Image: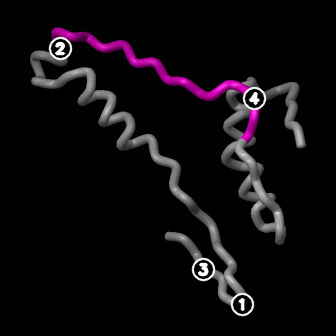
Amino acid sequence: MSLSSDTLSESELYTYGIFSHPQQLATINGVTLPAPFGGKVRQVMVDLDPARLQAKGLSARDVNNAINAQNLTLPSGTAKIGDTEYRSK
């Protein structure tokens, strides 16, 4: 399967391919989903002011850890196992 778009950027298409499309395909019995190949991974750049960080007693690693702690991908939706359907919270 390949994805293309006239309106989405390459990184937006990559994000769609990782997060939206597999969730729809995963409901089909017997489907195996490989990781997407190609595209651009979304990247965020942060400019830091070393003097202001030092004044607050923080390091660049502290900022990195805070960003990573808030940038989570959590499962959602339902899982059907046999006749029972489980809902994630």
Measured Cα–Cα span from mark 4 to mark 1: 37 Å
- What amino acid type is highlighted by mark number 3? Tyr
Q: Nearer the viewer, mark 4 or mark 2?
A: 4
Which numbered disc covers residue 86? 3
Nearer-N-terminus badge (4/2): 4
Q: Nearer the viewer, mark 4 or mark 1?
A: 4
Mark 4: amino acid: Gly
According to the picture, the residue beneath numbered tag 1 turns out to be 83
Residue at the disc numbered 2: 52
- Helix, strand or loop for disc 2: helix
Q: Horizontally, is 15 left or right of 46 in the view?
A: right
The residue sitting at 40% across, 18% down in the picture is 46
Which amino acid, by three-letter code, is at mark 1?
Answer: Asp
State how far apart marks 2 and 1 are (Cα).
57 Å
Mark 4–mark 2 CB contact (< 8 Å): no
Residue 48 among magenta residues:
yes
Q: Which residue is mark 4?
A: 38
CB-based contact (under 8 Å), mark 2 and mark 1: no
Q: Residue 58, located in which quarter of the rendered image?
A: top left
Which is closer to the viewer, label 2 or label 1?
Answer: 1
**Magenta region: which residues?**
36-52
Q: Residues within 10 Å of mark 1 (few under 14, many from 20)?
A: few
